[in-house]
Amino acid sequence: MNFVGACPPPQASESVSPSVSDFLQSIPPARATRLRERLERELPRLRRCLDPLYGQTPCFDSFFDTVVLNALASAERRDAELWQLDLRREADPAWHQRGLSGYCTYVDKLAGTLAGVQQRIGYLRELGVNYLHLLPFLKAGSAPNDGGFAVASFDEVEPALGTLADLRSLCRALRQSDISLCSDFVLNHVSHEHAWARAARAGDPRYLPYFHWLASEAEVQAREQHLVQIFPATAPGNFTWIAERQAWVWTTFYPYQWDLNYAHPAVFADMAAALLNLANQGVDAFRLDSTGFLWKRAETNCMNQPEVHLIVQALRSLCAIAAPGVLLKAEAIMPTQDLPPYFGLGPVAGPECHLAYHSSLMAASWVALTEESPQLIEEVLRNTPELPVGASWLSYVRCHDDIGWNVLRPELLALGADPVARLDRAAAFLAGETPGSYARGARFQASAPGTVHGSNGMTAALVGLRPDLPADHPEQQKALRRLELMMSLCFFVGGLPLIYMGDELGQDNTSAAEMHARQGADGRELHRPYLDEKSLASRHQAATVAAHAFSLLQRLNRQRRARLSLGGPIRLQVLASRHPGLLVLQRNQEVGLFNFSATPCRLHLSELGKPALQNLSQEESQTVASVHLEGHGCVWLGA
Ligand code: GLC
């Protein structure tokens, strides 16, 4: 998109421009009327976001008009079914808060192609999920491409996975089964093979400003002093030398992922257009990848800058005009204290993301398991704010990324602990380095001594399930309890729980042979196996690990839906208990007991000041006044 040219006279800020007015007159009246209403609400918001970002650039009004017209054109193209869905969701903005539960997978790992995923819809329904997050499926740069997170075209599906027609067909089929599709939207960077990057590398003046260029080593050094390292072992540094330009380009992640320059208005306009175009294929939700890194500011760590929120709120506003049924989910793997702004609760107030990953809760759960104490979870939950109406946390046990430890530093510091030492102990335990550890994970990006980065491994391997033992072996029984503990907590806390592919079958790590065969030196491949057909087939065979895990997750999905399908706000509270290993949570009228210790315990509900409650963790609930919990046992209780 190009904004160079003669500037039309500026518009009064909240009025509709003549071109917008002409456009609305040219489309069917029913849509035009609805779009006028949406514009009336959204234009002031959009201007409030875009003005501070781009108000100083020449032709701002022309830029603003183009962005709005593009959204309107997108709304006009939206097919009738999606338009109707938008209307229903606009009338019921809490539609996603009535027991949505999710499943996350790579397309190829689950089913080869998008058409293959369509064949797995029955399986997803059997599991009981109604939200499917497919990791990047758009055309990627040639391998290695960070599992598709280096996008080479926002308008094409990765040819090995299918076509745009396959995507539309999948979206339709999912919709018919009441499953929402979430797509990654990699908005911080593009592949160095994307047309914009190729043109910039060749010196095209239109695309050079799409990226951040540094001319001297001194500038690079000055910036590096303040920046974090995402992949310190495999991709140290944040800049990559481009010989053709005799300059460094900003590459926060891998050198082949070029950070986009959102200070350039055309970048925002093009990315907004790409997002709306994907929404029109039928995508229901976007995972806004690496959201925290979108804005660079000298002498800062270039994370979570206020402008990030203006950008995301502007995208939300454009969705509210052109695709209001669409959800935005922040992938901001940041400490809890930095997350409220992603829900529009920061200094830049306004509707922002509907969902955000609660990565501190996830990481703290793993620390709790290794320490046999829920202390860190309790601290994280105390720091977790209540969310605005219509917003929820995304809770998870594992995902395709490492368990990133550094998000927990603020909580650990508040507890007076040495964060590195304590996290290092958790990482050592999960890597099976600690004597007596049952875990079979691995450290990720372990680099300099005195630092701790992340841990890899499938849930099954981290909780100590072993492929060589039968499910009824006492050690497997203990590991299955740990699996249930982690999953059950994730489902109890009340947001949108997300199951990572393979966990529902207790699937093990990628095999050593396959790890060896895979391209690139990224340790996260350890938990990116192909769905194991043998486990899949044995999910109905009693006394297999797959059957245990699968029926557990089916039950959690059922229970959760039964309790939360009415929607409404969720209040989560930490209750005190005299058992040091026991986490006691109250969610509205329900109580969840999670024993992080390997030692059994008994709790009388009177100790919590509660009357007898129903045990909800059994298919036939029973009223109980006290509960015996096995080591690593858990239970949900309710009125
Ligand atoms: C996100 C993705 C991760 C990827 C990174 C860069 O954090 O989850 O897998 O490496 O973004 O795109």
Image (cartoon, rainbow, N blue to C red):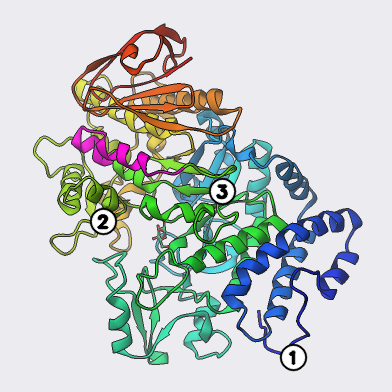
Which residue is the site of mark 3? Answer: 354
Quarter of the displayed picture in which ligand 1 can be seen: bottom left
The percent coordinates of residue 391 (x first, y second) are: 55, 44
State left or right for residue 275 relative to residue 14: left
Task: Tell me, yes or no, if residue 594 can be seen here.
Answer: yes
What residue is rendered at 45% in x and 81% in y? 212
Q: Which corner quadrant holds the N terminus?
A: bottom right
The CA span between labels 2 and 1 is 57 Å
Task: Tell me, yes or no, if residue 500 can be seen here.
Answer: no
Helix, strand or loop at label 2? It is helix
Helix, strand or loop at label 3? It is loop
The CA span between labels 1 and 3 is 39 Å
The percent coordinates of residue 300 (x first, y second) are: 36, 72
User: In front: mark 3 or mark 2?
Assistant: 3
Precedes in sequence: disc 2 or disc 1: 1
Which residue is the site of mark 1? Answer: 6
The CA span between labels 3 and 2 is 39 Å
- Count of picture labels: 3
Label 2 near label 3: C-beta < 8 Å? Answer: no
From this viewpoint, which residue is outermost toward the left? 435
Which residue is the site of mark 2? Answer: 516
Identified by mark 3, the residue type is His
Q: Which image quadrant is residue 564 in?
A: top right
